[in-house]
Image (cartoon, rainbow, N blue to C red):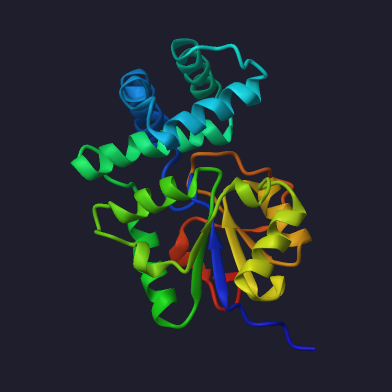
Amino acid sequence: MSTPQIRAVLTDIEGTTSSISFVKDVLFPFARSRLQGFVTEHAADPAVAEALAEARDLAKRPDLDTASTIELLAAWIDEDRKAKPLKTLQGMIWEDGYRSGTLKGDVYPDVVEKLTEWKETGLSLYVYSSGSVLAQKLIFGFTHSGDLTPLFSGYFDTAIGSKLEVASYQAIAAEIGLQPSEILFLSDNTKELDAARDAGMKAIGLDRGEVVIPPETTHAIAKDFAAIDARAGTVR
Protein backbone atom coordinates (compact mmCIF):
# COMPACT_ATOMS: atom_id res chain seq x y z
CA MET A 1 0.00 0.00 0.00
CA SER A 2 1.40 3.41 -0.96
CA THR A 3 1.99 6.07 1.67
CA PRO A 4 -0.66 8.87 1.50
CA GLN A 5 0.74 12.07 0.05
CA ILE A 6 0.71 15.15 2.25
CA ARG A 7 -1.96 17.67 1.25
CA ALA A 8 -1.73 20.13 4.16
CA VAL A 9 0.90 21.46 6.57
CA LEU A 10 -0.09 22.35 10.14
CA THR A 11 2.55 24.39 11.94
CA ASP A 12 3.27 25.53 15.46
CA ILE A 13 4.64 29.07 15.89
CA GLU A 14 6.91 29.49 18.93
CA GLY A 15 10.24 27.76 18.30
CA THR A 16 9.05 26.59 14.88
CA THR A 17 8.23 29.51 12.59
CA SER A 18 9.33 32.17 15.06
CA SER A 19 11.93 32.45 17.79
CA ILE A 20 10.98 31.65 21.36
CA SER A 21 12.94 34.72 22.43
CA PHE A 22 10.62 36.98 20.42
CA VAL A 23 7.61 35.66 22.31
CA LYS A 24 9.30 35.59 25.73
CA ASP A 25 11.43 38.72 25.48
CA VAL A 26 9.31 40.98 23.25
CA LEU A 27 5.63 40.02 23.15
CA PHE A 28 5.10 39.01 26.78
CA PRO A 29 6.86 42.08 28.28
CA PHE A 30 5.03 44.33 25.80
CA ALA A 31 1.65 43.01 26.95
CA ARG A 32 2.57 43.03 30.62
CA SER A 33 3.80 46.63 30.61
CA ARG A 34 0.61 47.82 28.90
CA LEU A 35 -1.90 45.55 30.63
CA GLN A 36 -2.98 47.95 33.37
CA GLY A 37 -3.37 50.94 31.09
CA PHE A 38 -5.17 48.98 28.38
CA VAL A 39 -7.65 47.28 30.71
CA THR A 40 -8.30 50.47 32.67
CA GLU A 41 -9.02 52.38 29.47
CA HIS A 42 -11.13 49.66 27.83
CA ALA A 43 -12.74 47.94 30.85
CA ALA A 44 -16.21 48.91 29.62
CA ASP A 45 -15.66 47.50 26.12
CA PRO A 46 -17.76 44.31 25.79
CA ALA A 47 -14.87 42.07 24.67
CA VAL A 48 -12.60 43.30 27.47
CA ALA A 49 -15.34 43.07 30.08
CA GLU A 50 -16.08 39.50 28.97
CA ALA A 51 -12.40 38.53 29.26
CA LEU A 52 -12.19 40.03 32.75
CA ALA A 53 -15.30 38.11 33.80
CA GLU A 54 -13.83 34.89 32.37
CA ALA A 55 -10.61 35.48 34.32
CA ARG A 56 -12.53 35.90 37.58
CA ASP A 57 -14.56 32.76 36.84
CA LEU A 58 -11.42 30.79 36.03
CA ALA A 59 -9.79 31.93 39.28
CA LYS A 60 -13.04 31.25 41.17
CA ARG A 61 -12.83 34.84 42.48
CA PRO A 62 -16.04 36.56 41.36
CA ASP A 63 -15.44 39.21 44.03
CA LEU A 64 -12.34 40.70 42.38
CA ASP A 65 -12.53 44.31 41.28
CA THR A 66 -10.86 45.53 38.09
CA ALA A 67 -7.55 46.42 39.76
CA SER A 68 -7.31 43.02 41.46
CA THR A 69 -8.22 41.25 38.22
CA ILE A 70 -5.38 43.11 36.47
CA GLU A 71 -3.00 41.89 39.20
CA LEU A 72 -4.27 38.34 38.64
CA LEU A 73 -3.69 38.59 34.89
CA ALA A 74 -0.19 40.01 35.40
CA ALA A 75 0.65 37.06 37.65
CA TRP A 76 -0.60 34.70 34.95
CA ILE A 77 1.71 36.37 32.42
CA ASP A 78 4.65 35.82 34.78
CA GLU A 79 3.63 32.16 35.13
CA ASP A 80 3.16 31.79 31.34
CA ARG A 81 -0.28 30.42 32.11
CA LYS A 82 -2.26 29.25 29.07
CA ALA A 83 -5.50 30.92 30.13
CA LYS A 84 -8.02 31.89 27.44
CA PRO A 85 -9.02 35.31 28.88
CA LEU A 86 -5.35 36.24 29.25
CA LYS A 87 -4.62 35.17 25.67
CA THR A 88 -7.59 37.25 24.52
CA LEU A 89 -6.37 40.41 26.24
CA GLN A 90 -2.77 39.88 25.16
CA GLY A 91 -3.98 39.63 21.58
CA MET A 92 -5.82 42.92 21.86
CA ILE A 93 -2.77 44.66 23.31
CA TRP A 94 -0.48 43.18 20.66
CA GLU A 95 -2.89 44.28 17.95
CA ASP A 96 -2.42 47.89 19.06
CA GLY A 97 1.36 47.38 18.93
CA TYR A 98 1.37 45.81 15.47
CA ARG A 99 -1.00 48.32 13.95
CA SER A 100 1.03 51.24 15.34
CA GLY A 101 4.22 49.75 13.89
CA THR A 102 5.78 49.28 17.33
CA LEU A 103 5.75 45.49 16.86
CA LYS A 104 6.83 43.45 13.85
CA GLY A 105 6.11 39.74 13.63
CA ASP A 106 9.26 37.64 13.91
CA VAL A 107 9.24 34.89 11.28
CA TYR A 108 12.37 33.04 10.15
CA PRO A 109 13.41 33.78 6.52
CA ASP A 110 13.42 30.06 5.66
CA VAL A 111 9.80 29.87 6.84
CA VAL A 112 8.70 32.69 4.54
CA GLU A 113 10.47 31.06 1.59
CA LYS A 114 9.18 27.53 2.16
CA LEU A 115 5.62 28.45 3.12
CA THR A 116 5.37 30.48 -0.09
CA GLU A 117 6.80 27.58 -2.09
CA TRP A 118 4.51 25.01 -0.44
CA LYS A 119 1.45 27.17 -1.07
CA GLU A 120 2.40 27.62 -4.72
CA THR A 121 2.75 23.85 -5.15
CA GLY A 122 -0.80 23.26 -3.92
CA LEU A 123 -0.37 22.49 -0.23
CA SER A 124 -2.86 24.01 2.19
CA LEU A 125 -1.29 25.72 5.20
CA TYR A 126 -2.68 25.95 8.72
CA VAL A 127 -1.48 27.20 12.13
CA TYR A 128 -1.98 25.54 15.52
CA SER A 129 -0.64 27.50 18.47
CA SER A 130 -1.41 28.01 22.16
CA GLY A 131 -1.65 31.72 21.36
CA SER A 132 -5.07 33.02 20.34
CA VAL A 133 -6.13 33.01 16.69
CA LEU A 134 -5.92 36.81 16.79
CA ALA A 135 -2.31 36.63 18.01
CA GLN A 136 -1.50 34.14 15.26
CA LYS A 137 -2.93 36.38 12.55
CA LEU A 138 -1.02 39.37 13.93
CA ILE A 139 2.39 37.68 14.03
CA PHE A 140 1.99 36.59 10.39
CA GLY A 141 0.15 39.70 9.28
CA PHE A 142 2.75 42.27 10.33
CA THR A 143 6.15 40.73 9.52
CA HIS A 144 9.31 42.28 8.11
CA SER A 145 8.43 40.34 4.95
CA GLY A 146 4.94 41.83 4.76
CA ASP A 147 1.53 40.24 5.27
CA LEU A 148 1.81 36.44 5.19
CA THR A 149 -1.79 35.70 6.18
CA PRO A 150 -2.92 35.06 2.56
CA LEU A 151 -0.74 31.93 2.67
CA PHE A 152 -2.92 30.29 5.33
CA SER A 153 -6.24 28.53 4.98
CA GLY A 154 -7.04 28.46 8.70
CA TYR A 155 -5.91 28.92 12.29
CA PHE A 156 -6.41 26.82 15.42
CA ASP A 157 -5.78 27.63 19.07
CA THR A 158 -6.50 25.73 22.27
CA ALA A 159 -10.24 26.33 21.84
CA ILE A 160 -10.10 23.12 19.81
CA GLY A 161 -8.17 21.36 22.59
CA SER A 162 -4.78 20.99 24.26
CA LYS A 163 -1.79 20.61 21.98
CA LEU A 164 -0.80 17.53 23.99
CA GLU A 165 -4.06 15.67 23.34
CA VAL A 166 -4.56 13.26 20.44
CA ALA A 167 -8.21 14.32 20.14
CA SER A 168 -7.17 17.88 19.27
CA TYR A 169 -5.34 16.76 16.15
CA GLN A 170 -8.19 14.47 15.16
CA ALA A 171 -10.57 17.43 15.52
CA ILE A 172 -8.30 19.63 13.40
CA ALA A 173 -8.17 17.00 10.66
CA ALA A 174 -11.96 16.84 10.70
CA GLU A 175 -12.19 20.64 10.49
CA ILE A 176 -9.74 20.72 7.58
CA GLY A 177 -11.60 17.90 5.86
CA LEU A 178 -8.60 15.62 5.33
CA GLN A 179 -7.45 12.31 6.70
CA PRO A 180 -4.85 12.80 9.46
CA SER A 181 -2.35 10.87 7.30
CA GLU A 182 -2.61 13.66 4.70
CA ILE A 183 -1.45 16.32 7.18
CA LEU A 184 2.12 17.16 8.22
CA PHE A 185 2.51 18.74 11.67
CA LEU A 186 5.60 20.80 12.51
CA SER A 187 6.64 21.71 16.07
CA ASP A 188 9.64 22.06 18.38
CA ASN A 189 7.77 20.18 21.13
CA THR A 190 8.17 16.41 20.95
CA LYS A 191 5.12 15.81 23.17
CA GLU A 192 3.01 17.70 20.66
CA LEU A 193 4.61 15.67 17.88
CA ASP A 194 3.72 12.48 19.78
CA ALA A 195 0.07 13.51 20.01
CA ALA A 196 -0.11 14.45 16.32
CA ARG A 197 1.51 11.17 15.27
CA ASP A 198 -0.81 9.18 17.53
CA ALA A 199 -3.70 10.92 15.78
CA GLY A 200 -2.37 9.63 12.47
CA MET A 201 -0.55 12.71 11.20
CA LYS A 202 2.97 12.86 9.88
CA ALA A 203 5.13 14.84 12.33
CA ILE A 204 8.52 16.53 12.04
CA GLY A 205 10.38 18.31 14.83
CA LEU A 206 12.22 21.62 14.50
CA ASP A 207 15.49 22.11 16.35
CA ARG A 208 16.45 25.76 16.06
CA GLY A 209 18.78 25.60 19.04
CA GLU A 210 16.33 27.13 21.51
CA VAL A 211 15.03 23.93 23.10
CA VAL A 212 16.60 20.61 24.02
CA ILE A 213 15.25 17.85 21.81
CA PRO A 214 15.26 14.58 23.79
CA PRO A 215 17.99 12.37 22.32
CA GLU A 216 15.69 9.37 22.51
CA THR A 217 13.04 10.95 20.25
CA THR A 218 11.85 8.82 17.37
CA HIS A 219 10.70 11.83 15.34
CA ALA A 220 12.55 13.13 12.31
CA ILE A 221 14.21 16.44 13.23
CA ALA A 222 14.95 19.35 10.89
CA LYS A 223 17.12 22.38 11.58
CA ASP A 224 14.88 24.61 9.47
CA PHE A 225 12.06 24.49 6.94
CA ALA A 226 14.52 24.26 4.04
CA ALA A 227 15.40 20.74 5.16
CA ILE A 228 11.78 19.56 4.95
CA ASP A 229 10.19 17.80 1.98
CA ALA A 230 6.64 18.77 2.90
CA ARG A 231 4.89 16.79 0.18
CA ALA A 232 6.61 13.58 1.30
CA GLY A 233 6.52 14.45 4.99
CA THR A 234 10.23 13.75 5.37
CA VAL A 235 13.49 15.49 6.23
CA ARG A 236 16.05 15.65 3.45
Q: Quadrant of the C terminus?
A: bottom right
Asked if 35 appears above or below 91 in the picture, the reply is: above
Q: Position of residue 5 (x, y in %)?
A: 63, 82
Asked if 51 appears above or below 225 in the picture, the reply is: above
Q: Residue furthest left?
A: 101
- 216 or 148: nearer the viewer: 148
Residue 13 visible somewhere in the drawing: yes
Q: Position of residue 40 (x, y in %)?
A: 34, 19
Look at 30% across and 23% down and name the residue there: 41
Q: Position of residue 165 (x, y in %)?
A: 74, 49
Side of 231 relative to 196 (left or right):
left
Side of 114 relative to 187 (left or right):
left
- Say how many tags the image has: 0
- 205 or 33: nearer the viewer: 33
Look at 80% across and 89% down and name the residue there: 1
Look at 32% across and 55% down and name the residue there: 141
Residue 107 visible somewhere in the drawing: no
Asked if 71 appears above or below 196 in the picture, the reply is: above
Q: Position of residue 104 (x, y in %)?
A: 27, 44
Look at 59% across and 11% down and name the residue there: 63
Asked if 84 appears above or below 8 in the picture, the reply is: above
Q: Quadrant of residue 95?
A: top left
Side of 168 relative to 233 (left or right):
right
